[in-house]
Amino acid sequence: MWISGQVIERIDWSDKLFSLRIATELAPFIPGQFIKLSQMQGDKRVARAYSLVNSPDKPYAEILAVAVEDGLLSPQLHKLSIGDEIDITPTATGFMTLDEIPKGKLQGKHLWFLATGTAVGPFLSMLDTAEPWQRFEKVVLVYGVREAQDLAYLDKLRGLEQQYPEQFKLILSVTRESITDALQCRIPDGLVSCEIEDKAGIRLSVGDSQVMICGNPGMINGAQAALLNKGLAKNLRRAPGQITVEKYW
């Protein structure tokens, strides 16, 4: 089922990285879930999944995307202007949510978000709600990109640093540039070397940590391997652990 949405705002972070804010009638959703956007191209419908960046209390759907040169839909989304229409699923889905994190004694004190590129989207949605701040003593977002221009919503994230100075730690890693106060390593390498933990000022541990990972398969596999080596375990409903994963493709 598809409903129509109308672009009401767009942000161009770089020549290919962009956000669209779409006025539509979404069913209630859980932060971290995704919707699908779609277009008819000739007689064929092309659809792709995009995580919602906005929190559920907003009267619109907001997505963060990158125009992939040979992509079937993202270049078309990149061409959309305010007032243009796009088909959207009315119901969000997905399990990259804080509902999947164990509660009580198994929860731990520290919530870690590990993201590359546009996969920061679901974490932005969560951070814009009260839940992570109420459930955890410390919240760490590790945000990895290739170049500084690939960092989206940086002002929003800096605002969270000011709002939660003792609780929130933002760790940026820009692999192809040297940026002040940012790491210059891939997230898996930073976990192995402990650079990320040093920057956060806290340690990853079975008792204290919950880690949510979202991004490209290479980062996810490498980060998960590094965390398993530190003694953490994958979080399963039948066997609660510390690592929750969603692959972006």
Image (cartoon, helix red, strand yellow):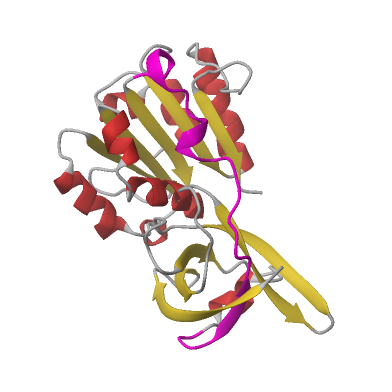
Q: Viewer-proximal residue, 108 or 145?
A: 108
- Give the image quarter of residue 151: bottom left
Q: Main secondary structure of the magenta part?
A: loop
Give me the residue at 47% from left, 13% from top. Answer: 230
- Give the image quarter of residue 60: bottom left
- Give the image quarter of residue 235: top right
Does 206 sit above or below residue 199?
Answer: above
Query: Residue furthest toward the right?
Result: 43
Q: Position of residue 97 (x, y in %)?
A: 50, 40
Q: Position of residue 70 (x, y in %)?
A: 70, 69
Give me the residue at 41% from left, 37% from top. Answer: 113
Quadrant of the rendering where the N terminus is positioned? bottom right
Magenta-highlighted residues: 81-108
Callout count: 0
Q: Position of residue 54 (x, y in %)?
A: 41, 59
Give me the residue at 47% from left, 76% from top. Answer: 23
Q: Viewer-proximal residue, 156 or 60?
A: 60
Asked if residue 144 shows in the view, the reply is yes
Q: Position of residue 43 (x, y in %)?
A: 84, 82
Asked if residue 186 shows in the view, the reply is no
